[in-house]
Amino acid sequence: MTEDLAKDRRGILIILSSPSGAGKSTLSKRLMAWDSSIKFSVSATTRAPRAGEEHGREYYFYSKDDFQASVANNEMLEHAQVFDNFYGSPKAPVIAALQSGRDVLFDIDWQGGQQVRNSVRAEDVVSIFVLPPSIAELERRLIAREQDSAEVIDVRMKRSKDEISHWAEYDYVLVNRDVDQAENDVRAIVTAERLRRSRQIGLVDLVRNLNTEFEERP
């Protein structure tokens, strides 16, 4: 599906958050495959690139000094420290996408989600938190990814308890037992939120025209 970008509604900021391994990155990729008009908010980070990652595609890779300068210049919509690195969402690409009538997707943690929800764009936010079906399954998925050492996985597992404690701050909460069903649920949320009356900016004129047609009938 590719949405018609005619500006008949306001864009939305879609936040997907979860503890590491619960599925937010997979769901983000599937959502953009479903609707290619959705703009992914590429995060900035001070961590080193992994094999195959490119600047501006997976992340914008910053030095710590450059990242802190961007924060000081109010160039980040949100930012947070995760483990030993900093992460944030550059503001300019997000604003440009919204102005062109596109929805923007954020794959960020609860700290970043909280900042975006408290920003000047709060009324445009739709936030979704993804839970694992069990802690044992969460750990199994982290191990199966083969991205991190046993020590890093242990740190991520310990951090997940704090991350999960923020589930009630989100508009929607999904339990990712089956990724296909979770994808369908995310699609349904986005579709419904796009149809919210307050986001359909042409409705007032449409209803006015309908009433005019009533009055002009013989």
Image (cartoon, helix red, strand yellow):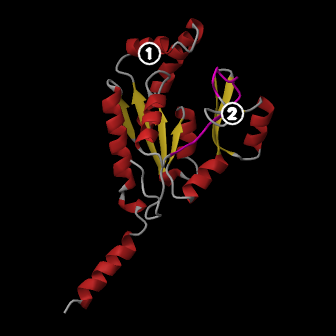
Q: Secondary structure at mark 1?
A: helix
> Which residue is identified by label 2?
55
Mark 2 or mark 1: which is in front?
Answer: 2
Residue at screen point 60% across, 38% down? 42
**Span shown in magenta:** 39-53
Kindly indicate whether the residue at mark 1 contacts the one at mark 2 (C-beta within 8 angstroms): no
Per the model, the C-alpha gap separating discs 2 and 1 is 26 Å
Q: Residue furthest top?
A: 150
Q: Which mark is residue 141?
A: 1
Crowding at mark 1 (Cα within 10 Å: few <14, some 14-19, many 20+): some
Residue at screen point 72% across, 47% down? 74
User: In this rendering, would 62 be left or right of 33?
Assistant: right
Kindly identify the amino acid type of the residue bearing the numbered disc 2: His
Tell me which corner region of the image, top left, top right, bottom left or bottom right, holds residue 134: top left
User: In this rendering, would 153 be left or right of 211?
Assistant: right
Most foreground residue, 126 or 43: 43
Kindly identify the amino acid type of the residue bearing the numbered disc 1: Arg
Q: Residue furthest bottom?
A: 218
Q: Is residue 203 above or below residue 11?
A: below
- Check residue 119 for magenta coloring: no
Position of the C terminus by quadrant? bottom left
Q: Is residue 58 above or below residue 89?
A: above
Residue at screen point 63% across, 23% down? 52
Residue 211 placement (x, y as % from top left): 28, 81
- Check residue 45 for magenta coloring: yes
Most foreground residue, 57 or 176: 57
Give the prevailing secondary structure in the magenta stretch. Answer: loop
Residue 201 placement (x, y as % from top left): 43, 66
Residue 158 placement (x, y as % from top left): 52, 14
Q: Secondary structure at mark 2?
A: loop
Q: Is residue 25 above or below residue 154?
A: below
Crowding at mark 2 (Cα within 10 Å: few <14, some 14-19, many 20+): few
